[in-house]
């Protein structure tokens, strides 16, 4: 039972960490400090979603991730 609780707590913690990292990369892309190609593979789709939906800048994201960049 304790292992299951520890697993769920770790999973919740890691989900929050991934969301924060995605937001960090999204901000860096909008500020043109980081190119989208430099974003780690597992974070590309969440970062693309943030840049497109929250910042409203699909021109910075490649079409394969839902953006309009060539």
Image (cartoon, rainbow, N blue to C red):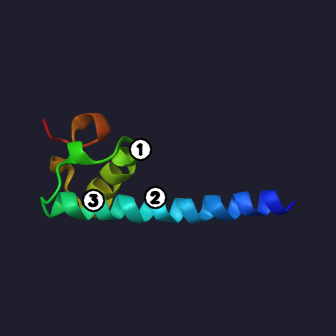
Q: Where 53 sits versus 37, above or below?
A: below
Q: Residue at x 23, y 59 (%)?
A: 56
Q: Which mark is residue 14?
A: none
Q: Answer yes or no: do the residues labelled 1 and 3 have beta carbons within 8 Å?
A: no
Task: Look at the image and tell me in which quarter the N terminus lies.
Answer: bottom right
- In this view, the mark in front (2 or 3): 2
Residue pointed to by mark 3: 26
Q: Label 2 to label 1, Cα distance in Å?
A: 9 Å
Q: Between residues 63 and 4, which one lies in front from this camera angle? A: 4
Q: Residue at x 17, y 55 (%)?
A: 34
Q: Answer yes or no: do the residues labelled 2 and 1 have beta carbons within 8 Å?
A: yes
Secondary structure at numbered mark 3: helix
Secondary structure at numbered mark 2: helix
Residue 57 image point, x, y percent:
19, 56
Q: Residue at x 27, y 56 (%)?
A: 51
Residue pointed to by mark 1: 42
- In this view, the mark in front (1 or 3): 1
- Sequence-wise, which precedes: disc 1 or disc 3? 3
Residue pointed to by mark 2: 18
Q: Label 2 to label 3, Cα distance in Å?
A: 12 Å
Residue 2: quadrant of the picture? bottom right
Residue 67: quadrant of the picture? top left
Residue 55 image point, x, y percent:
25, 63
- Sequence-wise, which precedes: disc 2 or disc 1? 2
């Amino acid at each position: 039972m304790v292992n299951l609780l520890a697993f769920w707590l770790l999973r919740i913690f890691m989900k929050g960490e991934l969301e924060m990292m995605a937001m960090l990369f999204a901000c860096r892309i909008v500020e043109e400090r980081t190119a989208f190609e430099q974003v780690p593979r597992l974070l590309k789709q969440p970062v693309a979603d943030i840049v497109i939906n929250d910042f409203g800048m699909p021109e910075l994201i490649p079409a394969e991730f839902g953006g309009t960049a060539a």
